[in-house]
Image: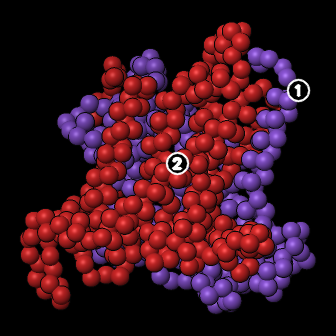
Chain colours: A red, B purple
Amino acid sequence: MEKRVVFNGRLLPYLLLAPQLVITLVFFYWPAGQAVLQSFLVQDAFGLSTEFVWFENYQVLFSKPEYYKSMVTTAIFSSLVAFFSLSIALLLAVQADRHIKFAAGYKTLLIWPYAVAPAVAGVLWLFMFQPSLGLVSQAIRVAGFEWNPLLRQDHAMTLVVMSATWKQISYNFLFFLAGLQAIPKSVIEAAAIDGARPARRFWTIIFPLLSPTTFFLLVVNVVYVFFDTFGIIDAATQGGPAKGTETMVYKVYSDGRSGGDLGGSAAQSVVLMVIVIALTAIQFRYVERKVQY
Amino acid sequence: MVQRRRLLDFLPHLILLIGVAVVAFPVYVAFIASTWDAATISNGSMPLRPGPHFAENYYRTIFIGTSSSTREPVGTMMLNSLIMALTIAIGKIAISLISAFAVVYFRFPFRMTAFWIIFVTLMLPVEVRIFPTYKIVADLKLLDTFAGLTIPLIASATATLLFRQFFMTVPDELVEASKIDGAGPMKFFVDTLLPLSITSVAAMFVIQFIYGWNQYLWPLLITTKDNMQTIVIAIKKMIVTQDALTEWQLAMATAILAMLPPVFVVVVMQRLFVKGLVETEK
């Protein structure tokens, strides 16, 4: 799609583009290029000489069990958050889609957690589940369950999954609600006349018709867990205990901060870039079919 | 809708009310904690109703700050966060508007190259290139400055794509009319295009303000001075792992204060927020 009528100007368009292009080149392409370059280099211990080593950094990276562990952690974390936030949001959206009173009010009351910073969400849940003084953890202890996210990896994972899910429900809810409202009512009425009960109507008509929305949200949720949960993890568990909640992004940060292995850290960044590009490509392939640019 | 049943009318309300309660509970607990004293919280006997220390805790948080971990008053940090969020939101919108205008309304060599250079940045979130970007900001001597805090986050393809898409829907007749009236490109941009884009700009502003306010990893690396901290990174610093030292009532007051501006924006400008959210994801 192109405009038929345009303005003439030799210098002006370049001047208009300049701010964005300069910032993009300096703060996106330059560092990304540095990361790629560095991932092929090895520095000696004193930083005096560097050597081009091809894929050695990647070989070292993929021979480390910790790296696979962070991959598994990321996979578990993403699937749990995606599963819970999608199903809870869908349940709530289906209720809000019925023509009930206060539907708009419920919507307002459900969407605001989107605006809460991930780090703040992490702190809120940490406080409730703090082993010694948390309100909820005390209740759990009274029920006879030994809860301690500072010592148990599975408990720490539960904690970050809960905070990440809590924050993501609002987003999924909005998109599910929009998806539900786009389904023609006549289809559902036809099924009702044929005698299909609500549960059957949901699984045989509504859910399949919602599948584009669900798929889109699935990709968005995975991207969210990969990159936007850094604040939650850093605030609630710092990747611990014993790296039990260390995702791939968190590992880039904690390895890079402890310093030393520049090449290895850069190789991790490049692996992440490849993953984002793949996820974005999936998202666009799908979105392209629906939206015309 | 389809059929009316008494149970089916009641059940949605029940489920939604439970949903709303579960979603609001963590914030309620945080608010309650911000109205009690440290001793009540740390011995684990905090009741579920507001305590008597509301004014005292919030006064101390905003004007004095915590004693050990973050030192600066939270009021300063809120101001820092506000400057950061506004600069990111306004900066992003400004540079995206003009670059989208250039790509849509002009024909020039390397037009599509420029477009793709911007487009690809969709795929490079700051988290994956964090240390090289940090190094560049450090080399440019921008650590502990608002420029270093905001400029690297200003460039993004989302807003440019959104405005490009919107400009495409603006009828060509408007350009022709402007040309007949003898208006140049900048006059057309300011007098015709900007007024038409106002809703898109506002929707974008809501999303980008939240994005800017909630930044965490970037300010964490870029700010080393206490008086440059933003409120979001300060909260985490207030939580000391050895919990005896954590002043929970102040940390929770800070959490509430950190949530207020973005949540307020979402609730008050809900329509624009939903529009912005749906459009940026396309």
Answer with left or right where residue B152 lies relative to residue B209.
left
Query: The residue marked by circle 1 belongs to what chain?
Result: B
Q: Which mark is residue B233?
A: none
Lateral position of residue A48 relative to residue A251, left or right: left
The quarter of the picture where residue A87 lies is top right
Residue type marked 2: Ala
At 57% from the left and 43% from the top, the residue drawn is: A86
Residue kind at label 1, given as amino acid type: Arg
Name the chain letter of the residue that bears numbered label 2: A
Instruction: From the viewer's side, name the closer residue of B265 and A182.
Output: A182
Q: Nearer the viewer, mark 2 or mark 1?
A: 1
Q: In this rendering, is residue A282 above or below B130?
A: above
Q: Which residue is mark 1?
A: B6
Q: Quadrant of residue B45?
A: bottom right
Residue drawn at x 76%, y 16% as measured from the top left: B2
Residue A241 picture location, percent across and down: 50, 77
Image check: A158 left or right of A61? right
Task: Determine if residue A221 is in view.
Answer: yes
Residue at image coords 33%, 28%: A7
- Residue B74 point in image, percent of width and height: 67, 76
Gap between marks 2 and 1 measured at Cα: 33 Å
Q: Locate the N terminus of chain B by quadrant.
A: top right
Residue drawn at 32 percent across, 68 percent down: A67
Measured along the vertical axis of the image, is residue B57 above or below residue A10?
below
Which residue lies under the disc numbered 2?
A82
Total marks shown come to: 2
Give whichever of B97, B208 is nearer the camera: B208
- Kindly indicate whether the residues beneath marks 2 and 1 are on one polypeptide chain: no
**Residue B59: % across, % down:** 79, 78
